[in-house]
Image: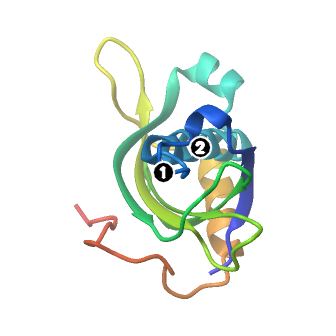
Amino acid sequence: MAGLRIYRSAVQPGWIDYNGHLRDAYYGVVLSDAIDALMDRVGIDAAYRGRTRNTLYTLEMHMHWLEEVKASDTLEIDCVVLGLDAKRLHLGCEVRIARHPSPVATAEFMLLHVHQGEKPGAAPFPPEVLAALERLRAEADGGDWPGPRSRELALKKR
C-alpha cells in the first residue's frame, strides 16, 4: 500500500530516552504534526479552521513500535486513507527512517470532523475536503494495511 509522504522531522536531542531511543511519546508528537500536515493538504488548514470552527479530533489511535529510532535519525511519515465516510477518516501512517528498509513504527487513527463550539459535535466534511480525501484514498495502490493489528479499527455502518 503506497502512502503519501506527508511529514519529515529530525529527531530532537530531548526526545531520546535513557536507552538512547526515541521516547514513546514523541512518536505521538510527530504523528500529530503529520496529521496537521495532512489537514493542510486536504483543505482543513488554519484559514478553514478559523472560518468554519471545524477541525479533526482523534477518536482512537493504535500504535506499533517495530524497530529502534536513534538520535541521528530523521523521521519520515507516510499516510494512507484506509477508510472514509461523511464525518470520519480512518488513516494509516508509517514511520520510516533512511537506514531501515521497512517501517520502524505504524499507527492507525480514527479521526472525526468536528464543529467546535460550546458543545462540540460531529460535522460532515465539506464536499471539497471529502473530494481531496477520496483522491488520496484512490492514490493508494490498494491491498491490506501492512501494519500489525491488535484489534480492528474500521468504519462501522450505523
Can residue 30 be seen at all in this image of the molecule?
A: yes
Number of numbered tags placed on the structure image: 2
Q: Earlier in the sequence, mark 1 or mark 2?
A: 1
SS at badge 1: loop
State the image quarter where residue 90 is shown.
bottom left
| Dot 1 amino acid type | Asn
**Residue closest to the eye, 84 or 72:** 72
In this orientation, which residue lies closer to the viewer: 153 or 77?
77
Q: Position of residue 12 (x, y in %)?
A: 68, 37
| Mark identifier at residue 133 | none
Residue sitting farthest toward the bottom: 143
**Does residue 84 appear anywhere in the picture?**
no
Instruction: Write down the residue under mark 1.
Output: 19
Query: Closest to the observer: 11 or 39?
Result: 11
Q: Which residue is drawn at 40% across and 42% down?
A: 58
Classify 118 as above or below 86. Answer: above
Residue 87 at x, y = what percent?
42, 48
How crowded pointer 2 is (Cα within 10 Å; few <14, some 14-19, many 20+) is rated as: many
- C-alpha distance separating marks 1 and 2: 20 Å
Q: Is residue 48 left or right of residue 104?
A: right
> Amino acid under label 2?
Val
| Residue at (22% x, 61% y) in the render | 158
Task: Name the residue carrying label 2.
Answer: 30
